[in-house]
Amino acid sequence: MNKNSHLILRVIKKYSILLLGSLIAATGLEIFLIPNRIIDGGIVGISIITSFLTNIPLGLFTFLFNIPFLFIGYKQIGKTFVITSLFSITSFSFFISILHPVPGLTYDILLATVFGGIILGAGVGLILRYGGSLDGTEIIAIILCKRAVFSIGQIVLIFNVFIFSCAALVLGWDRALYSMLAYFVAHKAVDIVIDGFDEAKAVMIVTNNGDEIADAINARLGRGVTFLEGRGGYSGDEKTVIYSVVTRLEIAKLRSIINDKDVNAFVTIHDVSDVMGGTDRKRSIH
């Protein structure tokens, strides 16, 4: 198969997953949250409130309200991101319109909040993982954080505090609080879809028994390692530094290996957002 065929298949896969993510997100919204008058954050939340107030179909607002932000994003962030986001938003708005006449699956407010948040977050996570977005507030946050002291997360939080306050005035405080819970659940579901259950962890081990620890990591965990040369800042002694990437579920076994081979080893462990390339025997962390 030539290079062009691989590129075409990759593009087809990407947009198929964006389409699937849009359908999943729309299902969480229209089958669980909307029938129970629970909103999401961001532009989707503004669209839901506006739809409740005007009785105009929600799908129209989710599309129209995002267009100005996509235009700004095209100027500031890039064409590829805007194209994938436009495709995702258009698909999302279409599926919302299609699913709107379908009755809600449950009218138990807590069940609707939790499962609606999970399903919505799973759909949004798929879209984010493949380079798209359903919400213009994220685009504005990316742009504003370059010029302000606030981070992207803080800017999005400020937007959502305003949106949920409006929801409290329109829908009542109980629905606003359930909406905040749904948003929290969806946010956690997004993290799981993007990072996976077996979250990647980068490990750096400063040791005098580098070969033994590396062999054990390779044999018992099936993970590759990289050796770095180090020197103690105080003692000046030469040290071996081992770098490897494991999953969260393998951390306990890794600790056991290190304790067996060098109880005095200095170890740091931190999160990794993504892993690409390498010659690891286990080719994928997720």
Image (cartoon, helix red, strand yellow):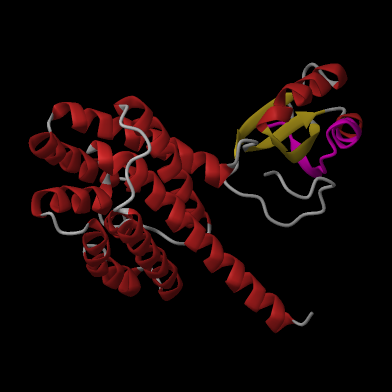
Whether 104 is drawn above or below 11: the answer is: above
Q: Is residue 141 left or right of residue 83?
A: left
Q: Position of residue 141 (x, y in %)?
A: 29, 54
Query: Residue sitting at 68 percent across and 55 percent down?
Result: 276
Task: Determine which quarter of the picture holds residue 273.
Answer: top right
Query: Residue sitting at 69 percent across and 28 percent down?
Result: 249
Whether 186 is drawn above or below 72: the answer is: above
Whether 110 is drawn above or below 203: the answer is: above
Query: Residue sitting at 87 percent across and 28 percent down?
Result: 209
Image quadrant containing the N terminus: bottom right
Q: Is residue 39 left or right of residue 204?
A: left
Q: Is residue 91 left or right of residue 20?
A: left
Q: Can the viewer see residue 79 in this picture?
A: yes
Number of numbered markers:
0
Residue 283: within the magenta?
Answer: no
Q: Nearer the viewer, residue 186 or 48?
A: 48
Q: Position of residue 59 (x, y in %)?
A: 27, 60
Q: Position of residue 32 (x, y in %)?
A: 35, 39
Whether 138 is drawn above or below 6: the answer is: above
Q: Nearer the viewer, residue 174 or 190?
A: 174
Which stretch did the figure color magenta? 214-234
Task: Determine which quarter of the picture holds residue 252.
Answer: top right
Q: Can the viewer see residue 149 in this picture?
A: no
Q: Position of residue 134 (x, y in %)?
A: 36, 57
Query: Residue sitting at 88 percent across and 30 percent down?
Result: 220
Image quadrant containing the C terminus: top right
